[in-house]
Amino acid sequence: MSAREEILGRVRSALASADRTEAPVPRGYRSAQPDGDVVELFAERLVDYRAELTRCTEDEVPSVLASAVRDASPVLVPDGFPWEVPGGAADTGQSAAELDRVGAVVTLAAVAIATTGTIVLDHGPGQGRRAVSLVPDRHVCVLRAEQIVPGVPQAVAALSPDRPQTWISGPSATSDIELSRVEGVHGPRTLHVLLVTSGATR
Amino acid sequence: MSSTFVGMPAFPTAAREALSDTQLRRNLAHATGTIRAKRAEVVGEVDDWEELRLAGAAIKDNVLRNLDEHLLRLEESLTARGATVHWARDAAEACEIVASIARQHGADEVMKVKSMATQEIGLNEALQDAGVTAWETDLAELIVQLGDDLPSHILVPAIHRNRAEIREIFRDRMGAVGRPAPEDLSDRPADLAGAARLHLREKFLRAKVAVSGANFAVADSGTLVVVESEGNGRMCLTLPEVLVSVVGIEKIVPTWSDLDVFLQLLPRSSTGERMNPYTSTWSGSTEGQEAHVVLLDNGRTRALADEVGRQALRCIRCSACLNVCPVYERTGGHAYGSVYPGPIGAILNPLLRGTGVDDQIDSLPYASSLCGACFEACPVRIDIPEVLVHLRSRVVDAHRSSPKPEAAAMKSASWVLADAKRLSLAERGMGLAGRVLNRWGRRVMPGGRRALSSLPWPGSLWSTARDVPAPPTESFRSWWRREGRR
């Protein structure tokens, strides 16, 4: 008998006398809303996890981007990223070792979550393949305020499992040594989010 | 290493040894206290936490009730998205599958994402025997691997090591397996993490094959989910050409949308964060990577067959139960002799391996005061005390052939208590003894009752640490006959 048949057989005999009817799952949590403004909450929670945050208007994006990437060179710019970046280089399928010599990467995001301060990349246009937002040490992400959803349920509902996803909450971190939190292990040691709000005022 | 460490003594012996290590107790008290406080704070932020726990438990129960159908659905979804699905009855079969995939690609090393399933099956040792070196990439796992040590906590496996010990391990051992630690390495956590970053980066960049587990496997989309903090997971999941994921058959959730419960429950219960720094999800072969998924039984169907114990298969390996456990906090993880320590380990090991086969495993259901803190902290509401009591009865049943003095005493007590006449006779005897002993007893207990401070052997085994109250001179029943009817 194959392992597959044997395991399925064991499962069926383990459940031979079990009640197989499914229990109802409470889903009230899906309609819960956080108090207050989701954009403000996102900003507060993002900074709480030691990410850098700059708010700007649409017009200010190019200049804020230029200062956010610092003097990094080259700066990897994925296909579909809508702004010019000084020192920008296209993604030409660089190897991991080549990406290790890239100073910074700029991306868009698919959605962001207010209650947890999370940005989610589904690696669509302007977000690049997974390695480009991982290997370089500085990740600058441009997010529009209207992409922010209140909580995890709204984010899961807005995303499709057909796309690979990376959920990012602050820079990489570890608490493995005496539980003291250290930012910056293997992922980018700096996460800088540019939060674009419409209108002229911040 | 198999799911239990070979040659470990039973829990009471191992616990006594651990308790005498004051450094270990200090590290543990600090670590568990810190995580407990962080968890309490972020759980308190969520108004519907109790509903999320109920939802998590219900979703997992529904999966377990129809596990055969969900497994077939998962296999179909994964296959449709270009992954190769393997099935492994036990640890040896799972290890052989991973080793043969590494061999097919000519790899003499694999990079590993921290995974309980691969520790449970002893994958690193099995790969070593097959000529393949497995590199642990989680910082704590790296500390354990370099220190030739055993993990002691599900989430923070090096919880028993402090910063000075970690610096020594890095300085002494890194050079032998790759880039050495800097000469002037300090014991600041940031510097130690920096040394690990440099040491592992060259390995990440050249890796051809990686091995991961999965926190969740979504049946209807074939999506695997890995929840982590450091980015070592993303490195392993993203950069190598081949990815092998070893997934316990109980890791399934039915639909993508069910993740909205678990991605709230897990980080807050586990690290005490609103969200862990990185979560990766992928469905089958992604960005041209060759994807293999090994569906692992290794005792899970045995646990599933136990009507009371099957709820342990809801476990999402958050380790909240360890951090709140008064026993774990004092003994640490090694005393449990398994990669699954603490309250969950005390039920999971006997359920996966069976009772009555190994004295070490049989000792685990007793490693608890049944205080219930674990049940309260569990994000999927596993009633660990209920399962502990159930497993104790199974352990007793398995050892029934050799009667113990306590069992003999209980048996004679039940003979006396079963019959009113016998009981009344016994009570008269006790009353007589009480009148005599009340005169002899030197000690006076609160309330004025006399007590004996020592008994002749074998009663001395009891009385060395306790006073024995003198029996009352009159039983309740005789008092009631005399006074109660007035």
Image: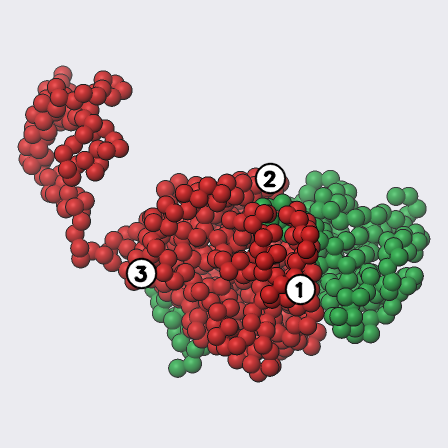
> Which residue was labeled with disc 2?
B41
The quarter in which the C terminus of chain B is drawn is top left
Q: CA distance from mark 2 to mark 1?
A: 39 Å
The kind of residue on which mark 2 rests is: Glu
B23 and B444: which is toward the camera: B23
> Which residue was labeled with disc 3?
B358
Q: Colour of chain B?
A: red
Q: Is residue B170 left or right of residue A78?
A: left
Sooner in the amino-acid sequence: mark 2 or mark 1: 2
Q: Residues within 10 Å of mark 1 (few under 14, many from 20)?
A: some
Q: Is residue B54 left or right of residue B183?
A: left
Sooner in the amino-acid sequence: mark 2 or mark 3: 2
On screen, B310 above or below B478? below
Q: Give the chain letter at badge 2.
A: B
**Disc ID at residue B263:** none
Q: Give the chain letter at badge 1.
A: B
The kind of residue on which mark 3 rests is: Asp
